[in-house]
Amino acid sequence: MTLKKSFKLATVFNIPIEVNYSWFIILGLIIFTLGSGYFPYINPGLDSSIYWLLASISALLLFASLLAHELSHAIVARRNNIPIHGITLFVFGGVAQMDAEPSSPIIEFKMAIAGPIMSFTLALLFFALSQLLFTLGTSGPIISLLYYLFMINIVVGVFNMIPGFPLDGGRVLRALLWHVFKDIKKATAIASNLGKLFAFILMAFGIFNIISGALVSGIWLIFVGLFLQEAAEVSYRQIIMKKMLAGVGIKSLMTRDVITVPTTINLDELVNSYFFKYRHASFPVMEDDLILGLVTFHDLKEIPRQEWPTRNVKEIMLPLSELLVINQNADAMDALAKMAQNGIGRLLVIENTKLIGIISQKDIMQLFKFRAAVEKD
């Protein structure tokens, strides 16, 4: 089966919450930093186990704060009829997985501003709670935990309000520019360029920190800068792609003469007669004219080679599911979104339970490159 990069944690307000495995990098870093630095410095003289307990609780509450930030985006999106099929938390924060872009500047503005408002609201709540408990004479470690959460939510809110796409502040700026210019492409270009400028500033500060001896913070700033630069470029390309591929149906792009694999052959024959011969990364699996699923080269490699002669295709294929199938009347952007979800890069085009074609990411991207080259000229 294809490798999962995240796992489902829970469902909140009918929105699936997933955690990317990379998020454990920042979780561990936060616990180590708080347990070995912040809490011992603020509350000297306590047992080390208390410091690590406080650090772990703080990291989990930060996790909850980031989740609340992303949920606010998702809830506003759903209230404005934008489908959200999940939220994923990863090493640099989180992202709400939208099936469509906002249809107007005002919806974009409301969605973007919801996250920072949530972070600032949480900061205010943690601050108010810390002051209340201080007045009641609560012990110092609890106050220091709440003060950390107050400060970190302020940092999250301020950082996200920087006017560089795809940060929330960049989306707010894009909404304003979109309203002024009536052109989302132009608005995205300006906001993305500001996002890249901010990324370069972060990387410059990172290099300065490394030279100054702050190795860990310097490396971290450089990684965040590289991530933001790439995110800004990708976000702009996505807008361009959506404009160029708007209304393009997969019916005109799909391959109709599909090479299929029977269920009965073993994996040795699958390799020699299909993967080596046709050099495709996956093949539809058929049984008596009935489409059953898809077999991929990745799934084949998961099987020990000595088992290939005794295992057949049906044992390792991906069974037919909604994420593998698309209707011929769907458009190219719908197909790309579904391919991003299944992680395979191909979709089976099925009509009345019959396989009538196959569409790949390569087919769509080739058209996009041609159209981009024509428009550039």
Image (cartoon, rainbow, N blue to C red):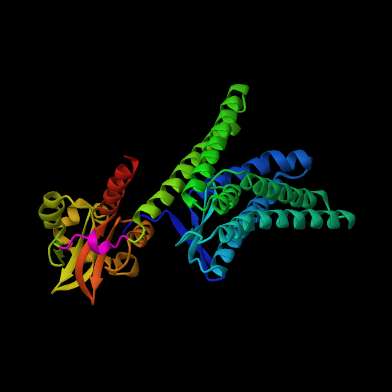
Q: Position of residue 140 (x, y in %)?
A: 82, 49
In-front residue for pair 38/306: 38
Q: Residue at x 56, y 45 (%)?
A: 26
Q: Is 137 situated left or right of 220 in this image?
A: right
* Residue 30, picture quadrant: top right
Q: Is 180 situated left or right of 323 in this image?
A: right
* Residue 270, picture quadrant: bottom left
The answer, for residue 347, to whether it is visible in the render is yes
Q: Is residue 354 above or below residue 185?
A: below
Q: Is residue 265 above or below residue 92?
A: below
In the rendered structure, which segment of residues is drawn in magenta?
A: 248-256
Q: Position of residue 227 (x, y in %)?
A: 49, 41
Locate the N terminus by quadrant.
Answer: bottom left
The answer, for residue 12, to whether it is visible in the render is no
What kind of secondary structure does the magenta stretch mostly adopt? loop
Q: Position of residue 243 (x, y in %)?
A: 39, 54
Q: Is residue 266 above or below residue 177?
A: below
Residue 250 in the magenta stretch? The answer is yes
Locate the C terminus by quadrant.
Answer: top left
In-front residue for pair 300/66: 66
Residue ranking furthest to the bottom: 352
Residue ranking furthest to the top: 211
Residue ranking furthest to the front: 181
